[in-house]
Amino acid sequence: MRSFTFHPGPRLIAGADRSKDVADLLPKGPVLFVTDEQLTGLGITDAARDALEALGKPVTIFDKVEADPSRATLEAAVEAGRSAGAASVVGFGGGSPMDVAKLAAYLLGSGDDLDSVWGVDIATGQRLPLVLVPTTAGTGSEATPISVITCEGGVKLAVNSRPLTADWAVLDPQLTVGLPRGVTAATGIDAIVHAVEAYTSARLKNPLSDALAREALRLLTTNLLTACDNPRDIAAREAMLLGAHLAGLAFSNAPVAGVHALAYPLGGLHHLPHGVTNALMLRHVLQHNAEAARDHYAELAPIVVPECEPEGSQARVALLIDRLDQLVRESGIAPRLRDYGIDIGEAPLLAREAMKQTRLLVNNPCEITEADARRLYEAAW
């Protein structure tokens, strides 16, 4: 066996209505509860918040987190926690609230300056106790040590360090039952991309991340359309949540690559949902990678297309890419940049911005140059 390192994620609780268990997982003292206004407005956070307060753990709600959270939002969350004397942090929501909660817990606990910890394995301090509760099945943020923040000019910067890994994650499928189809689709495709890119990552790929990525891909591709078409199907919701979590564990060890690198400028400049931007670039980046990652894509094909014949790897690669593209379309995601008002003339700008995502591009199975990125955006138009 070749040498490798694998980092497990948080301890896990899973099951319907388990979100109220957050109260038992945190120490005494004030809690900073990071979420968004839609969730508080719908009352989805009430059970967890009431359980905390019933145990004498006063809650400060910070629900101003937006999609692609900004540095200003992160700093406001930190200030809210500091003012409350927070002893612990809960992140409750999609990837955006969880990303803010992770980094807020770290900054509150460590006292580090934000600008000193951007990057990989730079943050080494001690965070506050942290529990994460996803309300979408996609980002896998509850499983990862990564927080992505949108900074000046729409550039996404990340802190990727083990101290950001939560103490606990709670997977409660009841929280996802009311999701609109578009959110179910976009977050599901995001998780699928996590699994595929982890399996083909050029760095740190290992047998454990591979096993997690394969099982994640099976759960996600088997259940995505059921969750979209029958949103109250609790078994499909459970499978999607678990698949997204396993994909998160996979890519936190074997990091994502070109699809994400080219998706980020679309989100930063046009404020599209992250899963949608991944869906827009998925086919085109996989085709770009097809020769370099041929064997790995061929290994994944029978998971996504069980009826595929044991024929040449090139045929299997084509089947994999076509089926993933079909899932994007059948889920209801419009598949072209033009569908979102993006002009083909933006391709040079998008390509330049994509080149800033060096932490992701280095993981791609083959090089993506600026000229390649421009061509891929044009193909996606």
Image (cartoon, rainbow, N blue to C red):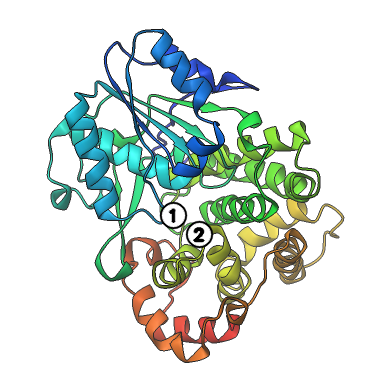
Residue 198 drawn above or below residue 282: above
Earlier in the chain: of badge 2 and badge 1, it is 1
On residue 274, the disc is 2
Residue at x-position 46% and y-position 86%: 347
Q: Amino acid at mark 1?
A: Ala
Where residue 228 appears, x then y in whole percent?
A: 75, 49
Q: In which image quadrant can residue 316 be found?
A: bottom right
Q: Amino acid at mark 2?
A: His
Would residue 264 be found to the left or right of residue 29 on screen? right
Q: Can you tell which of label 2 and label 1 is closer to the viewer?
A: 1
Question: Which residue lies at the image location 59% right of the left edge and 84% below the top edge?
Answer: 379
Secondary structure beneath dot 2 equals helix
**Residue 374 spot, x, y in % from top left:** 46, 85
Query: Mark 1 sits on what residue?
Result: 67
Q: Is 165 on the left or on the right of 72, as rendered? A: right
Question: Is residue 46 in view from this perspective?
Answer: yes
Left or right side of 2 for 324: right
Residue nearest the viewer, comparing 371 with 126: 126
**Disc 2 vs disc 1: Cβ atoms closer than 8 Å?**
yes
Q: Is residue 259 above or below residue 3?
A: below
- The numbered disc on residue 244 is none
What is the spatial separation of the Cα atoms under label 2 and label 1, in whole angstroms?
Answer: 9 Å
* Residue name at image x 62 percent, y 35 percent: 242
Residue situated furthest top in the rendering: 55
Q: Is residue 148 above or below residue 26?
A: below
Q: Secondary structure at mark 1?
A: loop
Q: Quadrant of residue 232?
A: top right
Residue 361, picture quadrant: bottom left
At x 31% / y 67%, what residue is drawn? 155
